[in-house]
Image (cartoon, rainbow, N blue to C red):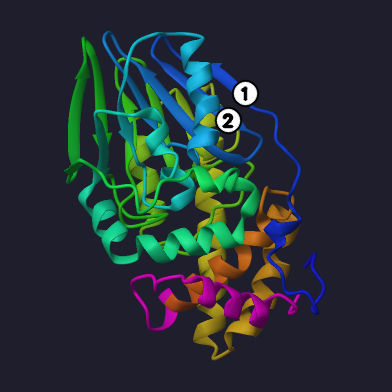
Amino acid sequence: MSQTASTKTFASHADVEEKQVSFDQLSPHAWAYTAEGDPNTGIVIGDDAVMVIDTQATPVMAEDVIRRIRQVTDKPIKYVLLSHYHAVRVLGASAYRPEHIIASQDTYDLIVERGEQDKASEIGRFPRLFRNVESVPPGLTWPTITFTGKMTLWLGKLEVQILQLGRGHTKGDTVVWLPQDKVLFSGDLVEFDATPYAGDAYFQDWPQTLDKIAALKPEKLVPGRGRALQTPAEVAAGLEGTRAFVSELYAAVKAGAAAGRDLKTVYRETYEALAPKYGQWVIFAHCMPFDVTRAYDEATQFPDPRIWTAERDIEMWKALEDVK
């Protein structure tokens, strides 16, 4: 991997280059804020209000999203939707001053269980994504409305379906579906030319959850990372690429674990197997240790993800980082 064995710093610490932001209109009501593989934000503009889907990592970073929203509408930002609990998605929420923050009950439960540890872990892993981290208010971002399965909002005459289709990236994953516009906001259930982070994943469930997204037949899709997908063919490619990565990684790890090989050996073999096909994807080197560790856990003795603490992150990285 890219760092020397003596430093043992996360691959992401070498990622200091600012990314070019795009703000694309996908339909009369849907916009995508994307930045070359950095975490995306979705925007839904209804008749009387705006919904923001995933907030950026800090309030200062969220201000750029707000500035772009204000270029196209002066309607109030009433709703923030959290596609899942990860800090990089939620800690910018205060900048929007929303009336309501919406999340699945499973996401709320994950914030209770591991929100503080995740916040410290993520900020330590990927400092560039937490620009002006001092602007984050003390404490955690708490939903004010939770749901299970499905919730429908009406922004005037615009129907907004908020759906929990199954586990994948986390157990609380939530998508936003605009049936009138055929646009879907997937959160990190779908990535495009970007490596899925799977440290909190349910590998065996993830492909079936992607099938449920496909069954909605979205014509456009905003992934968690990567550019907005603007045709049915591009949507299909995003779904298939994500499905292939998580399926191939889990199959390789499961086979290695079943053969009795230890985590270090399985990591080396899986990295070498996947790098030719996926190594050019954004944050591949950063994600692989977390992804393989979680897959090894799921294939052996931990059906549910263990909590990542800053200390556990560093221990894992030291153990695996010089294996490649």
Name above or below for residue 247 compared with residue 184. below
Looking at the image, which residue is at 51% across and 67% down?
250
Looking at the image, which residue is at 52% across and 59% down?
122
Q: Where is residue 189 in the image (x, y as percent from the top left)?
A: 44, 46
Task: Rate crowding at label 1 as few (under 14), some (14 to 19) or many (20 or more) other CA atoms within 10 Å.
Answer: some
Looking at the image, which residue is at 53% across and 47% down?
134
Assign a secondary structure to mark 2.
strand
Residue 321 in the magenta stretch? The answer is yes
Of the 4 image quadrants, the one containing the C terminus is bottom right
* Residue interval drawn in magenta: 298-324
Determine if residue 229 is in view.
no
Q: Type of residue at label 2? A: Thr
Q: Where is residue 64 in the image (x, y as percent from the top left)?
A: 55, 26
Quickly name the residue at label 1: 22
Q: Where is residue 23 in the image (x, y as percent from the top left)?
A: 57, 20
Name above or below for residue 190 compared with residue 275. above
Contact, mark 1 vs mark 2 (Cβ under 8 Å): yes
- In the visual, does 101 lie left or right of 265? left
Name above or below for residue 38 compared with residue 323. above
- In the visual, does 255 lie left or right of 89? right
Name above or below for residue 233 compared with residue 72. below
Quickly name the residue at label 2: 34
In this orientation, which residue lies closer to the viewer: 283 or 303? 283
Determine if residue 68 is in view.
yes
